[in-house]
Amino acid sequence: MKTGTVAIIGRPNVGKSTLLNALLKEKIAIVSDKPQTTRTRILGVVHLPGAQFALLDTPGIHKPQHQLNRRMVRTTMDCMKEADLLYVMVDATAAPGPGDRFAIEQVREARQEGRPPAFLLINKVDAVNKSRVLPLIDAYRKMLDWSEIVPLSAKNGINVDRLLELTVAALPEGEAGYEEDMLTDQPMRTLAAEIVREKILHLTRDEVPYAVAVEITSFKEEGKLARIQASIFVERDSQKAIVIGKQGELLKTVGTEARVEMEKLFGMKVFLELWVTVKESWREDEQTLVELGY
Ligand SMILES: Nc1nc2c(ncn2[C@@H]2O[C@H](COP(=O)(O)OP(=O)(O)O)[C@@H](O)[C@H]2O)c(=O)[nH]1
Ligand SMILES: [Mg+2]
């Protein structure tokens, strides 16, 4: 069968995690309109008749400012080394910008003699007029020796089947490496923490999304019930006040939305408790970053 590893690369916010979820037909990677939503490597396994491949969603390539960001970029570079094929994703709603050029430059440096092959994925074509796509293809064509150029919409599923066909054709022959029902290597604790973080990202803005981390402090399964306790870390008292909200409203909404999504993904009832804790400069603290799995 056709097997291998595919890494999704690109600047933040182009839709990498949305594509991972679309290809897996299950939401395992959190998505938001804020850059740097994905902080770790996320592995999903795509199962097709006659093919199985590991798909690596990455934090994306950007110029790092914090210790956390340096780790995120390093993770992305490591994923490229593991891959048999790269999906390099750009956004059809924007002209090629410095972020895209920087990402493509990193891809060029990580490859040796044109290996692994790279597909250019022009995402979000649902949001632009068709006439805008051809000039984009022309502009990007010059930047790397792409094996394929695929305009698509990860969100609406446009051309996603075509991408799968091209991917299977490009993968090497090999033995299946994963169990037939394996979806991701992320433990339930990690998925739970990420779901809580996503709900906070959706409900906050400015510097708050970047300053938030979530740690599951307790996860107990009792038959068809999961009792989950989570700590939400922020860097300042003012951020704590924002995350809790007036009379605890925001935190309550986070809790409700996160619980509903966990119940769907885990197929069990969830009892969720949330705490907000100030942890100054956690993004610069090596030990905290390790503890949080970054
Ligand atoms: N219109 C449109 N929006 C998309 C598409 N794919 C992703 N998005 C949106 O782009 C934003 C960033 O998506 P995300 O998957 O988190 O990007 P990542 O940072 O590259 O992983 C989110 O608001 C998504 O809903 C698409 O195909 N079309
Ligand atoms: Mg992402």
Image (cartoon, rainbow, N blue to C red):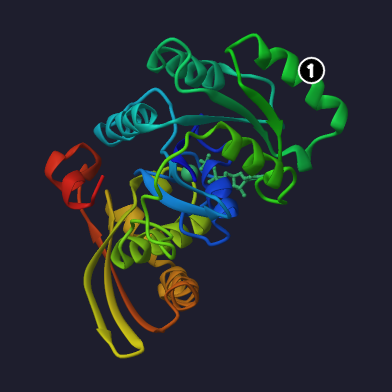
For the point 24% across and 32% down, the residue is 67
In the depicted structure, whether residue 109 falls above or below residue 274: above
Where does residue 131 sit, x and y in percent of width and height? 87, 26
| Ligand 1: image quarter | top right
In the depicted structure, whether residue 152 falls above or below residue 246: above
The answer to which quarter of the image holds residue 76 is top left
The answer to which quarter of the image holds residue 159 is top right
In this view, the residue farthest toward the bottom is 223
For the point 22% across and 52% down, the residue is 292
In the depicted structure, whether residue 159 falls above or below residue 197: above
118 and 47: which is toward the camera? 47
221 and 286: which is toward the camera? 221
The answer to which quarter of the image holds residue 243 is bottom left
Image quadrant in which the C terminus is located? top left
What is the number of callouts on the image?
Answer: 1
The answer to whether mark 1 is within 8 Å of ligand 1 is: no
* Residue 33 visible from this viewpoint: no
Where does residue 150 sit, x and y in percent of width and height? 69, 31
229 and 207: which is toward the camera? 229
Mark 1 packing: few (<14 Cα in 10 Å), some, or many (20+)? few
SS of the residue under disc 1? helix
What type is the residue that disc 1 sits on? Pro
For the point 39% across and 49% down, the residue is 43
For the point 70% across and 13% down, the residue is 139
Residue 83 relative to residue 283: left or right: right
Where does residue 182 sit, x and y in percent of width and height? 40, 61
Where does residue 263 sit, x and y in percent of width and height? 45, 78
In the depicted structure, whether residue 104 falls above or below residue 206: above
Q: Which residue is mark 1?
A: 135
* Residue 139 visible from this viewpoint: yes
